[in-house]
Amino acid sequence: MTKLKNIKVVVSDLDGTLLNPQHRISEYTKSIFQELHNQGYLIVVATGRHHLDAMGIIDTLEVPVYLVSSNGARIHSPEKEQLFSFDLDSDVVKAALNVEIDPEITVVLFKENVWQTNKWNEKLNSFQADLKYRPELVDYKTIEDFGAIKIFFSCDNHEKLVKLKDAILANSSEHLHHAFSLPTCLEFMDKSVDKAVAIEQVLEKEGFTLAEAMTFGDGFNDVQMLASAGKGLIMGNAPALLKETLPNLEVIKTNAEDGVARYIASKILNKEFVS
């Protein structure tokens, strides 16, 4: 097992991980990450969120952060320079959507500057404290360009998303892979796109390997980055199935308890938690 003293990089998901239940970074978490930066650790945020949305969040840390967004379809430097991008072809997306979709399901295409959706969803909007990545209501029967960074579906009924997932994979499994970032959120990306692959690109640029990285996550879009890191940590609030999928990984406190920051403070910075 990689010893913590060999860890040089900290990688964290956002929702359900670095962010508290109010979708914000706490002042305590901010202070720990600033100390982490001051001690020379490389910091990477890897999220399913779009980069315009995620940038506003990580800016509140006030430290240099590499951003892997849209589950690996975009990479930005700490200076916000785009280092990598990958988009799904319009025909691939159109084929994926050419299945029966339950009317309860919200359909979203991540575009470069807006997210196109078939319905207004207050729950999704609540994930953005500041609406920097704006929704655009569309009728998918009338649009021509289906090109997108990723396809996203939301529904409170998990079984309806599972049924949709099976239908899309039956049509498009040669092009797409999926992940449930939350039980209520189903995402489709190109088969070449994954957080772990993008993180490796960042680490290679900086002269590190995944063996020197500590990763934190709570969703099935985090599986590869958790499994391949020198030290992978699962959030206490993660679904039971994720914990069962990666039974050898340590489960830490929840995002409501500042689990990421508390673990870093204790295991890397040798600090006691102060409430």
Image (cartoon, grey):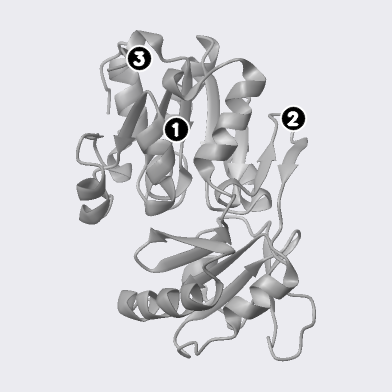
Return the mark for residue 268. 3
Which is more toward the observer, 42 or 30?
42
Most extreme residue toward the front is: 174
Which residue lies under the disc numbered 1? Answer: 27
Contact flag, marks 1 and 2 (Cβ < 8 Å): no
Contact flag, marks 2 and 3 (Cβ < 8 Å): no
Question: Callout 1: helix, strand or loop?
Answer: helix
Q: From mark 2 to mark 3, how far is it between C-alphas?
A: 26 Å
Few, some or many residues within 10 Å of mark 3 (<14, 14–19, 20+): some
Q: From mark 1 to mark 3, how far is it between C-alphas?
A: 19 Å
Q: From mark 1 to mark 2, how far is it between C-alphas?
A: 23 Å
Task: Identify the residue shown where x is 31% and y is 78%.
Answer: 159
Few, some or many residues within 10 Å of mark 2 (<14, 14–19, 20+): few
From the viewer's perspective, is the residue at label 1 or at label 2 nearer? 2
Q: Position of residue 146 (x, y in %)?
A: 73, 74
Looking at the image, is 113 positioned above or below residue 71? below
Which residue lies under the disc numbered 2? Answer: 79
Contact flag, marks 1 and 3 (Cβ < 8 Å): no
Q: Earlier in the sequence, mark 2 or mark 3?
A: 2
